[in-house]
Image (spheres, rainbow, N blue to C red):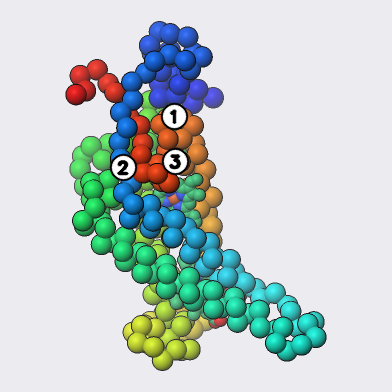
Amino acid sequence: MTAMSNPSTAAGIAATNGSSANGHQLVEYRRIYVWELPVRAYHWINAIALVALCVTGYLIGSPVRSSYVPEAFQQYSFAWVRFIHFVAAFVYVFNFLARLYWGFVGKKYAKWTAFFPFKRSQQQEIVDVIKADVLEVKMHGPISTGHNALAGLIYFGTFLVFVFQTITGFALYSSMSTSWMPRMFVWVVPLMGGEFAVRFWHHLFLWFFVTFVIIHIYLAFYHDYIEGRGTVSSIIGGWKFDRVKKGDK
Ligand code: HEM
Ligand code: HEM
């Protein structure tokens, strides 16, 4: 596998240093605080809310038959499923709004500019990540301290889907609630061609999230293994490690 000979792996570093590839040679690393507490809190609240939304959403679309229970009060499970969906929906929306705010006041790694490849260097990084990680036609992929430019762009796409799910979710909710928040989205239903269409699109994007989460978790572990600088633990504790290069202060 090309990964093991990549200079960013322990074996690769050893090879570049000319020492043995047993992972015991000294390499200098700098510890960098990358993900501030609000970013980490957003990440895990979002992950929990999203899993709850996907599971309960799936059950709303394909209800589990529970009518064999002897007492009527025992048939209340579907109401719990919907209740959890709606609670998770509010948590998810306000958590997302908090993250948007942090995109303006947070450190450079959390800033909204990290999600748009405006700079030439970011565009080049996207090409390099695709060549190294996706097509595997290039040996040395770029190693970014925050999100790499391609990951940032994909998160931005995910944020757009977050917004879409919120709009369609509140549109569905608007016919069952008198509260001002869902009522703000009443107009979406006729615009999208009726409740059936809104429900269809709202359901379809469930599968976008399922796909995203599987690939995302795989990539988090992949980068952790390839780069060996604490990618997975960084989203828990906030710190990553950058290799000190010649000429660094
Ligand atoms: C990413 C997050 C979300 C996912 C994956 C998701 C998923 C789903 C799914 C699959 C359904 C069932 C659709 C069907 O086949 O009938 C559903 C229903 C629904 N969702 Fe969501 N949803 C999300 C976010 C939201 C949000 C933010 C709201 C806002 C309140 C919301 C409100 C609703 C409502 C009102 C229903 C219909 C419930 C019913 O008719 O009993 N959802 N959701
Ligand atoms: C439902 C599950 C998950 C969702 C929806 C999700 C979503 C996201 C999002 C949106 C970001 C960007 C964060 C930001 O800048 O605000 C992110 C970053 C990150 N996530 Fe997750 N995540 C999930 C689960 C996980 C898990 C289980 C892990 C680790 C095992 C993980 C590891 C990471 C890491 C390491 C980053 C930073 C990656 C980078 O450097 O680009 N995530 N995640």
Name above or below for residue 217 compared with residue 171: above
Q: Is residue 45 above or below residue 14?
A: below
Under 8 Å from ligand 2: the CB of mark 3?
A: no
Judging by the rendered image, the residue that carries numbered circle 3 is: 233
Badge 1 crowding class, 10 Å Cα cut-off, few under 14, some 14 to 19, many 20 or more, is some
Some atom of ligand 2 lies within 8 Å of the CB belonging to the residue at label 2: yes
Residue 90 is situated, as x and y percent measured from the top left of the image, at 42, 73
- The answer to which image quadrant residue 9 occupies is top left
Secondary structure, mark 1, is: loop
Q: Position of residue 165 (x, y in %)?
A: 43, 70
Residue at image point 59% right, 75% down: 81
Q: Could you say where residue 116 lies in the image, as x and y percent from the top left?
A: 26, 50
The picture quadrant where one finds residue 8 is top left
Nearer to the camera, 120 or 245: 245
- Visible in this render: residue 143? no
Q: CA distance from mark 1 to mark 3?
A: 11 Å
* Residue 71, above or below 200: below
- Amino acid type, label 3: Ser
Which quadrant would the C terminus be assigned to in this image? Answer: top left
Residue 115 shown left or right of residue 155 in the figure: left
Residue 150 vs residue 108, the one in the foreground: 108
Q: CA distance from mark 1 to mark 2?
A: 16 Å
Counting other residues with Cα less than 10 Å from the Cα at mark 3, is it few (<14), some (14-19), or many (20 or more)?
some
Q: Are marks 1 and 2 in contact (CB under 8 Å)?
A: no
- Specify the label residue 228 is tagged with: 1
- Amino acid at the residue labelled 2: Val
Q: How many marks do you count on the picture?
A: 3
The amino acid beneath tag 1 is Gly
Q: Is residue 213 left or right of residue 149?
A: right
Q: CA distance from mark 2 to mark 3?
A: 11 Å
Q: Residue at x 70, y 87 (%)?
A: 73
Dot 2 corresponds to which residue? 34
